[in-house]
Amino acid sequence: MMFKTLFAAAALLFSLQSQATIINIQLDQNQYEVGDTVTAELWLSDIQDLVTGFDASLLFNTQLLQLQNVSFGDFLSIPAVGSDRDFFANGGQLDLWELYFGFSTEDMADLRAVQPGNNFRLASISFTALKNGLAKLQLGSANVVYEPVGNMPYLDMEVRADQALVQIGDQVTAVSAPTTAWLVLPALLLMLRLRRR
């Protein structure tokens, strides 16, 4: 909760940019069975500069998925300078955030040395598959904080959010209309024969 307040305060101080960063949800499998662990990773791409923080809300179906754990990536902190990272789950909404503690030019240079420039993993979230069905993982809100060298840091509030579909158990296949007609035809013929008698 305190981190949300920090982001709100940062939004007032930081200048907004029009370019949009993307946070993708990547699943470890295409299909799961009841009792399986579903692992969803949040990946950041279309990175504009040095990333110093993020926050996101992930929405999920609590009837199909039960939250197990959240682990964060290795690219928003360094051993000498940590980060504020945490998560909070309430019903079907998971709020997670991380903010780098470094402020000096040296701190930023050290973070830049460990951070890949094109894309990287922000967090990994694991769920337990509770029952058969199609569960949607949807990013609600998402923000990314950048720290361009030589400028004021800014908050990207136009992050493009992603969604992923989690298939638990077999997919229900709909019976096509022609197939249905062929299945019902014998019963209709029997009814017509009985009616003529």
Image (cartoon, grey):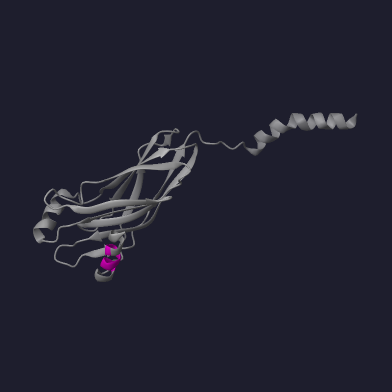
Residue nearest the observer in this picture, 191 or 181: 191
Residue nearest the observer in this picture, 89 or 17: 89
Is residue 179 in the magenta section? Answer: no
Residue 46 % position (x, y):
28, 54
Residue 91 % position (x, y):
43, 50
Q: Tell me which residue sits at (43%, 48%) in the image.
A: 60
State the extent of the magenta-drawn residues as a range: 6-11
The answer to whether residue 93 is above or below residue 16 is above
- The image quadrant where one finds the N terminus is bottom left
The answer to whether residue 16 is above or below residue 174 is below
Number of numbered discs on residues:
0
Is 36 on the left or on the right of 182, as rendered? left
Q: Residue furthest left?
A: 106
Q: Quadrant of residue 10?
A: bottom left
- The image quadrant where one finds the C terminus is top right
Residue 190 % position (x, y):
80, 29
Q: Quadrant of residue 193?
A: top right
Q: Which residue lies furthest to the right in this view?
A: 197
Is 102 on the left or on the right of 142, as rendered? left
Is 14 on the left or on the right of 166, as rendered? left
Q: Tell me which residue sits at (37%, 50%) in the image.
A: 89
The answer to whether residue 168 is above or below residue 139 is above
Is residue 10 in the magenta section? Answer: yes
Main SS type for the magenta part? helix
Q: Tell me which residue sits at (72%, 33%) in the image.
A: 184
Residue 24 % position (x, y):
34, 49
